[in-house]
Amino acid sequence: MEILKKLPMPDGMTKAEIVDLLLHEEYGYLPEAPQSVVAEVVGEEKNFCAGKATLRHLKLHTKNSFGDFSFPVFYACPNEKNEPVPCFIHINFRNLVPDRYQPTEELIDAGFAVLTVFYKDISSDDGDFTNGLAGVVYPNGKRTDTQCGKIGLWAWAAMRVMDYAQTLPEIDGGKISVVGHSRLGKTALLTGMLDERFFCAISNDSGCSGAALSRENDGETIAKIYEVFPFWFCERYAKYANQEDGMPFDQHYLIAANYPHRVYVASAEGDAWACPKNEYLSCVAASSFYEKQGKPGFVHPPRIAEVGECFHEGWIAYHKRAGTHYLSRDDWKFYIDYLNQHL
Ligand code: GTR
């Protein structure tokens, strides 16, 4: 816990200042919000999950000042409901429903709807900025050093799914959470920071440049992530490689800037690359920002979490499960428990 004394703290800053710092230095500025978002139903299965749900294949058409962009979305919603249901927006690694990272029938059984966006339908996971949304935003495939990388583009799409979710009468617009795993957990936290409509942003094993503090990280470092995945971030982020100690922020700023809604960080014990200790300490360090605004922050014991523990009392929540890097049913159970406790 010694590291906590060495961290810069966002407590004297406004949320807008934190957002600007993180966009300018790490993720880059996103394209502006669209003028309109219209959904086209491409396919429908009314008896999905033994008749418990309806699954729709949608195409979301966005009209923007920089150009139009359309992308597919899957939407599964319980058929039986007495009132508008809570919902997940899941930014996923595959365009499958269900998927090993998305146990859709269990989510339906728990009373949740789920909207899924496949990240590569937005733009490829590489340094090519000429395809998908990147190709529309960056017509010659070139960015300035503060324009966003792929994480920002994926987050932009998740917000468009949120725009659509807000129009659905069967969904409770105040009970929508965004969730993603690993690089898409980083994306979920960025989405949560930029979009105050969410109930909770959920980061599953997001690690370096996601939930985990960069200072004294035992797993992935900024130098390592930027060497392999420079296109996830804005180009200015490069200058922090091996310069963590002098950084004017750390990843707890991203957790803190999820205020005014809730934020959930999950770690896996066997996921050393994501540094579970630093994911936990980031929650600890972000707590005072929430507390200053009069919300309970991270309610936790004065030590590092043990395997199997969850801390679900505060507006910052955390669990550490056994096993490796994965978005498992065990993680979803923890999320559903937390949301049911507070929704
Ligand atoms: C790794 C990367 C991590 C994490 C992971 C993933 O290779 O170094 O930061 O994002 O990929 O997204 O699965």
Image: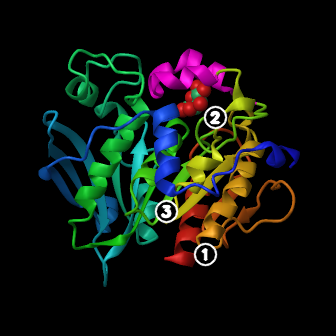
Question: Looking at the image, which residue is at 54% across and 77% down?
Answer: 342
Against 91, residue 55 (above or below) is: below
Q: Going by the image, does 46 lie left or right of 296?
A: left
The nearer-to-camera label among 3 and 1 is: 1
Please tell me whether the stretch drawn in magenta is mainly helix, strand or loop.
helix
The stretch of residues the image draws in magenta is: 219-240
Residue 153 visible in image: yes
Q: Position of residue 333 (x, y in %)?
A: 58, 62
Q: Position of residue 45 (x, y in %)?
A: 20, 56
Question: Looking at the image, which residue is at 47% across and 28% down?
Answer: 233
- Tag 3: amino acid: Cys
Looking at the image, which is closer to me, 13 or 250? Answer: 13
Q: Which mark is residue 196?
A: none
Q: Which residue is mark 1?
A: 294
Q: Which residue is mark 3?
A: 200
* Mark 2 residue's CB less than 8 Å from ligand 1: yes
Question: Looking at the image, which residue is at 15% across and 41% down?
Answer: 64
Q: Which mark is residue 208?
A: 2
Q: Secondary structure at mark 3?
A: strand
Image marks 3 and 1: residues in contact by CB distance under 8 Å: no
- Tag 1: amino acid: Gly
- Tag 2: amino acid: Cys
Q: Earlier in the sequence, mark 3 or mark 1?
A: 3
* Mark 1 residue's CB less than 8 Å from ligand 1: no
Against 271, residue 243 (above or below) is: above
Q: Secondary structure at mark 2?
A: loop
Rendered image quadrant of residue 209: top right
